[in-house]
Amino acid sequence: MGSTRMKLAERIDVDALLKSIGSLQDLHFRQRGLEPAMQQVVDAAKALFKADGAGLMLIGKGEVLRWVTATDPRAQVMEAAQERLGEGPCVEAFERGTLQLIPDSGAEERWPELTRVLRHDGV
C-alpha cells in the first residue's frame, strides 16, 4: 500500500492540486445546482491525476455505492458496471478504506466480472 501511495503522490502536481482545490470554492451549489458542481469535481480529478477518466460514486440507501457522474462515456461504463456488479476499484476502496489503482484494465485480475464488461465495451 505504501508504494501505491508513493506512485500516486509522484503523479500529483502540487501547484495543480492547490489550484484545483481553490476552484472548488467557486462551485456555487445553490445557484448552479449540484449536478454541474459534481461534474466539475470529476473533471478536476481527471486533470489533476492525469487519468484517462474519472467518476464519482456516492453512498445511497442501504449503504450501497451509486454512480452519479463521470468525465466521459468510458468512465461512465466503468462506474455503472461497478454499481451493477458490486465489484471494482471504487467498491473496494469504499469497503477497505484504501486506494485502488488500475494501471492496465486489460491486465486487471482482481475483478473478473468488471474486467469482462470493460473488455466487452472497449474500455
Image: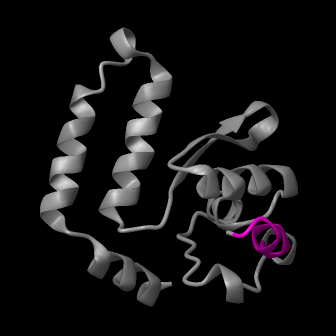
Left or right, 28 with respect to 38, comes to: left
Residue at the image position 22 percent from the left and 57 percent from the top: 17
Q: Is residue 16 above or below residue 59?
A: below
Q: Quadrant of residue 12?
A: bottom left
Q: Is residue 121 above or below residue 72?
A: below
Q: Quadrant of residue 107?
A: bottom right
Asked if the magenta segment contains residue 119, the reply would be yes
Q: Quadrant of residue 29?
A: top left
Please provide the residue range marked out in magenta. 115-122
In which quadrant is the C terminus drawn? Answer: bottom right
Asked if the magenta segment contains residue 74, the reply would be no
Residue at the image position 23 percent from the left and 48 percent from the top: 20
Which residue is more in the foreground, 94 or 120?
120
Q: Position of residue 100 (x, y in %)?
A: 57, 72
Characterize the magenta stretch by its predominant secondary structure. Answer: helix
> Which residue is situated farthest in the left direction here?
15
Left or right, 13 with respect to 59, comes to: left
